[in-house]
Amino acid sequence: MEEVRISTEYIKLDQFLKWAGAVDNGAMAKGFILDGFVKVNGNIEIQRGKKLRNGDIVEFEDKKYQVVQK
């Protein structure tokens, strides 16, 4: 599992995918999220504005990312 550090209280799911380097841009992130390809804490998440906080786990393309607040 890859830890992705953020310096804010939360980060939105679409922004997180870009920040983690999982997608190239926001349009790609939006498409993958709306099509049901992204899980947050084990559940499919279709809200691109979902707020991720410290400890949340995002699954995308057979990779897991954990949000870690600095």
Image (tube, helix red, strand yellow):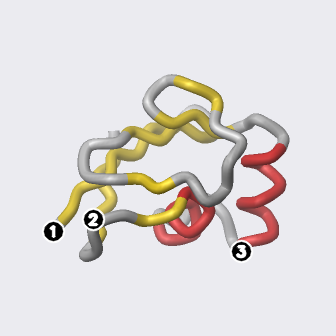
The quarter of the rendered structure image containing the C terminus is bottom left
Q: Quadrant of residue 60?
A: top right
Q: Is residue 35 above or below residue 28?
A: above
Q: In front of the other: label 3 or label 1? A: 1
In the displayed structure image, the side of residue 7 where residue 29 appears, left or right: right
Q: How far separated are the C-alphas under marks 2 and 1?
A: 6 Å
Q: Quadrant of residue 56?
A: top left
In the displayed structure image, the side of residue 46 where residue 52 appears, left or right: left
Callout 3: few (<14), some (14-19), or many (20+) C-alpha neighbours within 10 Å?
A: some
* Residue designated by label 3: 25
Q: Position of residue 7 (x, y in %)?
A: 25, 75
N-terminal of the pair, mark 2 or mark 3, is 2
Q: Secondary structure at mark 3?
A: loop
N-terminal of the pair, mark 3 or mark 1, is 3
Q: Position of residue 8 (x, y in %)?
A: 28, 74
Q: Residue at x 55, y 57 (%)?
A: 13
The amino acid sitting under disc 3 is: Asn
Q: How far separated are the C-alphas under marks 2 and 3?
A: 19 Å
* Contact? badges 2 and 1 (CB < 8 Å): yes
The amino acid sitting under disc 1 is: Lys
Q: Secondary structure at mark 1?
A: loop
The amino acid sitting under disc 2 is: Arg
Q: Residue at x 47, y 41 (%)?
A: 58
* Residue designated by label 1: 70
* Residue designated by label 2: 5
Of residues 3 and 15, the one drawn nearer to the viewer in this rendering = 15
